Amino acid sequence: MLNTQPPFIEKTGIDGLLVINPPVYYDNRGYFFESHNPLLFVRYNLFYHFIQDNQAYSKYGVLRGLHYQLNPVAQAKLVRVIQGKVYDVAVDLREGSPTFGNWFGIELSAENKKQLLIPRGFAHGYVVLSETAEFLYKCDNYYEPLQEAGILFNDPFLNIDWPIDSSELVISEKDRGLPLFKDAVYNFSIQDESAFLYSEEDFEE
């Protein structure tokens, strides 16, 4: 069967925030793909060291976010969906970035197999569009509850266009109590990006 592959990387208009399309190989048995290969990332000058995998199961209308961890334990994430579909959002919180305060949204699904690579210095959230969804994400730092922070999902300045009516949203009390963008605490700079890169020597055998 002929496989037409999309480009491995799609730009989003926000520096460092990338859509990843892993090559998927189909035949009469089904399909196969490498969901993450660090060596392939290195070929595109993406030097991330993911150390933890997390998985979340949610029902239709569940909105989680907008979340992030502060420096020095900020997290880069590689997110994808393995069952169902979600609308995934990342917000640039890096001071000095030309897109500071801008957001990007994309539908991630088990069907399209797209992934979103989110550098440190972004708030992140998603809402479930299918009956249920399983969301999987890699992190390059461990969870640190004392450094977690967030922004209210319906902040008027960000004006995120969530594709579900607000009456259908299912949101935790914790997330409903997050501050507005203007009151949020963050300590990221566009100059900090080199802090989470590491050498190609880490991949040498």
Image (cartoon, rainbow, N blue to C red):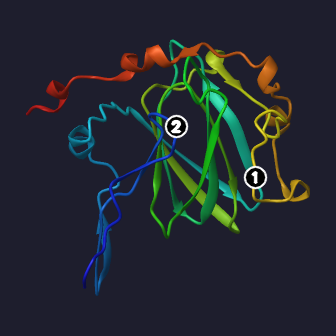
Count how many numbered circles sit on residues in the image. Answer: 2
Q: CA distance from mark 1 to mark 2?
A: 19 Å
The structure residue drawn at horizontal position 64% and vertical position 39%, both measured from the top left corner, is 103
Q: Quadrant of the N terminus?
A: bottom left
The structure residue drawn at horizontal position 45% and vertical position 25%, both measured from the top left corner, is 141
The structure residue drawn at horizontal position 46% and vertical position 52%, both measured from the top left corner, is 115
Name the N-terminal-most of marks 1 and 2. Answer: 2
Residue 70: which quarter of the image?
A: top right
Q: Quadrant of the C terminus?
A: top left
- Disc 2: which residue: 14
Vertical relation: 22 (above or below) 48: below
- Disc 1: which residue: 162
Instruction: Tell me residue 51's x, y (percent).
Output: 38, 32
Is disc 2 surrounded by few (<14), some (14 to 19) or many (20+) residues within 10 Å?
some
Instruction: Tell me residue 171's x, y (percent).
Output: 81, 45
User: Residue furthest toward the left?
Assistant: 205
Q: Is residue 149 left or right of residue 204?
A: right
Q: Is residue 44 left or right of residue 75?
A: left
Q: Nearer the viewer, residue 99 or 185?
A: 99
Which amino acid lies under the numbered mark 1 shown in the image of this protein?
Trp
* Mark toward the viewer: 1 or 2: 2
Vertical relation: 182 (above or below) 132: above
Q: Secondary structure at mark 2?
A: loop
Q: Nearer the viewer, residue 43 or 49?
A: 43
Which numbered dot is residue 203?
Answer: none
Which amino acid lies under the numbered mark 2 shown in the image of this protein?
Ile
Q: Secondary structure at mark 1?
A: loop
The structure residue drawn at horizontal position 74% and vertical position 48%, both measured from the top left corner, is 63
